[in-house]
Image (spheres, rainbow, N blue to C red):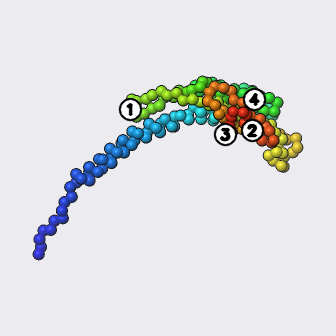
Amino acid sequence: MTGNTQEPMSNSRDSGCGCLLSLIVLGLLGLLFVPSYFRTSSYGHGQSEGRNYVGAMNRGQQAYFLEQDKFSDAIPALGLGIKTETQNYTYSIRVTEEAAFNYGIARSDQYTYKRKYFGPFHKKVRRPSRSYVGGVFIIPATKVDPNATADELTTISILCEAVAIGATKPAEPTYLDDKPTCGEGTIKL
């Protein structure tokens, strides 16, 4: 028998409905999680500036010491292009005979950023900032390189973050027991 056997046709609208429902669910999830992503990524921006700039100032002091055999008491002399004041921080240096202390002091107890969403929605939000201090210490080179000569000097550095939020100058780190140590109220990064 050569009859026409037809396979039952599936309703194409059924599969399209599932796809549409999936897109709606994904869209709703996006509306929930995208704003929280922006909030998280924007939160650390101000603090990362302070941490990065003071870290760069530490490295700049080490390079300056290699070339000049002393520390710089001026930020522009480090050649880093860091301004002494930004929207979030005020930067400064204090130099002694044995060390250089580099500061990133929060300009206030809070900083402001503009949180952006898709479309015309945005909101200014204030988040607290922490201050930073870096220390660069002159040490005998034999402490890090046993093959160095006895009169050779080198530097060692540390970067510390204030535990408390605010525009207070953090305690300076010290060099104790052959290692740099963060001052009271700060933690090593």
Q: CA distance from mark 2 to mark 3?
A: 11 Å
Q: Give the distance between the C-alpha atoms of the residues marked 4 and 1, in whole angstroms.
A: 48 Å
Asked which quadrant contains residue 163, the reply is top right
Q: Position of residue 187 (x, y in %)?
A: 68, 37
Query: Mark 2 to mark 1: distance in Å?
Result: 48 Å
Residue found 30% across the figure and 50% down from its top: 19
Say which residue label 3 marks: 189
Which badge, 3 or 4, is on the more N-terminal residue? 4
Question: Helix or strand or loop: what does disc 4 sit on?
Answer: loop
- Image point (11%, 75%), residue name: 1
> Considering only order in the chain, which callout, 2 or 4, is on the residue closer to the N terminus?
4
Q: Secondary structure at mark 3?
A: loop
| Res 72 label | 4
- Give the labeled residue for mark 2: 181
Q: Which tag is nearer the camera, tag 3 or tag 4?
A: 3
> Dots 1 and 3: beta carbons under 8 Å?
no
Residue sitting at the far right: 150
Which one is in front, 160 or 184? 184
| 10 Å crowding of disc 3: few (<14), some (14-19), many (20+) | few
Give the label on residue 119, or none.
1
